[in-house]
Amino acid sequence: MPDQPLRGRDAELRRMRELLDGAAGGHSAVLYIEGAAGLGKTRLLAEAATLAKGSGFDVVAVRVDESNRYPPLAPLLSALPEAESLEGREAEAHGRTRGAVRRHQLLDRLAEVLERRAERAPVAVLVDDVHWADPATLLTLRVLPNRLAGSPIVWLMAGEPVPDSAVMRLVEQSEPGVLRLAPLPAEAAAELAADLLGAPPDSNFSEFLAAAGGNPFLITELLREAIGEGSWTVTDGRARLSRSGLAADFSARIAQRLEAMPEDMADLLRVASVLGREFDLLHVARLLGHSVGQLVRPMRRLLREELLVESGPWLAFRHDLFRQAVRADLPTPLARALHREAADTLLALGRRPAEVVRHLLTGALPGDIKAAATLRAAAREIADFLPDTAADLALSALELTPPEDPERVEALTDTVRLLGATRRLGETLALATEALSLPMTPAAEASLRLTTAEMRMAGGRYPEALEQLDTALTLPDLPPALRLTLLKAKGTTHANLGEVEIAEAIGLDLVDAAYHDPDPAVVASAMLFQSHIAFLRGRLARAAELAGAAVRRAEETPAGIRLRPLRPPELWLATVLTSTERLEEADRLLREGRTQAEASGDVWSLPAWHTRGACLLLERGELGDAEAEAESALAVGEELDIGTPDDAALAVLALVAIRRGDLSAAARHLASADQDRQAGHPPPGSWTACAQVLLLDAQGDPGAGVAAGGHLYEAGATADLLALPPGLWPLLAAVALRANARPQAEALAATLGRLPERDLFDRAVFASATHVRGLLHADEAALEQAADGHRQALRPLAAAAAEEDLARLTGAADRPHDAARWLRQAMSLALSCGAVGDAERLQRRLEKVDRRSGPPDRVVAPKRGWESLTESELRVVRLVTEGLSNRAVADRLFLSPHTVNSHLRHVFAKLGVSTRVEVTRIAATHVLPPDSSLADEGGRPAPST
């Protein structure tokens, strides 16, 4: 009875009004309403919709239902259909229809649609019954509020408390914006009764209503029954029960009503309860073997009695608790059979396999081959959107497939392939073992062994991976492309084990076979392998040559090349060039490559593009931009549901925090990486190890830092050291010397000394090698040469480190004026890069060194306020003040929307605001960079300071 006042929820209504008022003022907010069925979540959202519409909001109502929990993103696309039409045109334009691509593009389009709407009016997104949502919808609801934090959007979501980890993660992320509904107090229950009865209930009537446990829906149902049966009177202004014997148990009362009502009405309800809260009358008619016309009379009576209601083009149960009670009254064999028949009926009427999954999971029995085939089809349909769910469906299909069925081998291999896309290593390997015990073709067996080898490689179990690959390579009559893939995987595995000589030998066979292949993609793939081996050998120039050749070969294939594992040639070339003086070229490759990946739908590579960009920007001393790119890498990874955050991105964030003097933030970032390794991931890579070294040193324990660096300080650790850009090499040597670990510093220097002579002609490599030599031998001339080389190679922070080392030498030689000069130069560079922590350390040293000429002026680098904004952040602010959306700003600045969003979050935090309106108001009182500074002649934003 929606016209009745909402009782007992005054505090909740106040909270929602506050959020709506905030959004009307430009703020965004998230509120998750959690409560058991019947406590009034839907009614609260309805009240919010009324309030929002009355305040001029654009209201987006999203209703999730049990019946649509498998088709990915169905509830959101139903509420925002323009997002799907936008995405459809883009996908058609690029000829791409893969699920992973479509999921990311749909998320982008949903963000774009909501951002556009929010430019016209504040938006209220109301999502009911979130606990039924599919994982892709839950992921989107986690991501979009952060992505659109600068837009006036209120997210009001409601769901029941369930043990589903994805739902729990959404609830945790919404904290402290979570309302947990409690049962109505007795006073509110009495007010609700008085609203319906016209008089307050007496003590006996209130005791009867107490059986509902404060649940508003159940209280209303008890009152409905009392009113319908006329079993109450008003005496002395109080409502009293006139007879006893009313059933207080809701399920028992529903069972009684079903038995008492005409058979055609009861049958309609029973069959509909299997289909879901909302249902199509045509489907009910088919399951009952009737025409729709035969259901007109019972349907009309059910509508009159308000057991059913109209819901757009469908019918719906008045409340899902009512549907659940009707469904619970069905005998189990009957319910199972109805679900199974519902699946066939819906498929016959044109529904997709994913839309009948829940019926098959409930209704199919072992041996049901048709159901197993449909589940496998559904798994393939949703695999790229929901890999874990697809794997579960494949496992369910396998349970239905008899051991002797000839389809079992295909079912097993399909399931292994789907599980291989998840992190469920144990299940995958167990099924693969079973599958390999069955007869299959050599090609099928080799593909299966390749899949299991790749999973073992992902878990760092390289010897086990080699065993699978070696067995696969002994199989006869393998297709050439498959054999090449196996060879490359084997070579990569040996390289990961540090067995570079074996990898090189395998590479000879691989390259020989690949270069005779007419497909330029195969040749490019072989060149990339050669480049990787050269890099591991410490031959930077040769690695860059081969990577460049691979890029040129890849350009001969219009659709791009497909590698296993996927690695765009431009991305690898940029990675190699980051370790050389060719930073500008690397930067261009990364920007163009990321833009092309977004445009073409190669979204799987976006986190890597952002991470490599962050690494380059850190090397170039652009800390703000490096932070934004690293945050973008993690955000895109979450949107793609990759699962494991990129360790290198986390390490970049830690290194930026160390430079800024925020050691607690650095520790948090590294703790995130450690948590993943504790869950069974490979040991820390070079980036994480380097960040751990520098953090421990900054905390005053360089000895622990050297121990954490481990492999970076081992003799001949060329591959580990070259995985880091040159600007970080001297920092590692300096930590070892501060820890009195000279052998480790000498081992690092020896590794650099073995680099080919042609690589030492590179200014960046030469400057860092010279810097390390200058540290080891306290060589002032070498350090001066290194500082100059770092500057020429566009490494300002490396130059600052060399100048700080020079200050130590000259200070120890009792030359305080020289030491002060070097410290001032280093501090100037640190401040220009936003390395506030470095600058403060240098300031303290300068105060000690320069006492004779009086204390130097204290340089304070602002951490908050307008003056703390970087050039990149100011460029974003300028375009925001012109009214551009995140997407439009990204297009103007040749950035990704994620990077723009990251810059905006930093702007909000520094200015102490939370809306674009407030940013625009503050910007109006300051001078912004002119249009000409937005990008350089090549279309790239001018570098940030």
Image (tube, helix red, strand yellow):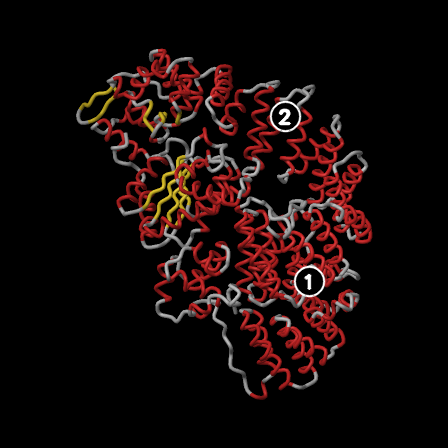
- Give the amino acid type for the residue marked by disc 2 in the picture: Leu
Q: Toward which corner of the image does residue 284 lie, by quadrant?
A: top left
| 699 relative to 292 in the view: left or right | right
Measured as percent of width and height from the top left, residue 138 is found at 48, 40
Pick the residue in front: 118 or 447.
447
Pick the residue in front: 209 or 411.
411
The residue tagged 2 is: 398
The answer to whether residue 399 shows anywhere in this view is: yes
Q: Is residue 215 above or below residue 672?
A: above
| 323 relative to 856 in the view: left or right | left
Q: Residue at x 60, y 76 (%)?
A: 826
Judge the density around disc 2: few (<14), some (14-19), many (≥20) Cα neighbours within 10 Å. many
Residue closest to the far left:
236
Secondary structure state at the residue bearing disc 2 = helix
Residue closest to the far bottom:
853
Look at discs 1 and 2 and give the one toward the viewer. Answer: 2
The residue tagged 1 is: 705
Q: Residue at x 67, y 31 (%)?
A: 413
- Give the amino acid type for the residue marked by disc 1 in the picture: Gly
Q: Does label 1 or label 2 sit earlier along the sequence?
A: 2
Measured as percent of width and height from the top left, residue 477 is found at 78, 34
Secondary structure state at the residue bearing disc 1 = helix
Pick the residue in front: 905 or 105.
105
| 36 relative to 619 in the view: left or right | left
Q: Toward which corner of the image does residue 904 lie, by quadrant?
A: bottom left
Q: Is residue 367 above or below residue 415?
A: above
The answer to whether residue 743 shows anywhere in this view is: no
Q: Is residue 199 above or below residue 330?
A: below
Q: Residue at x 78, y 46 (%)?
A: 513
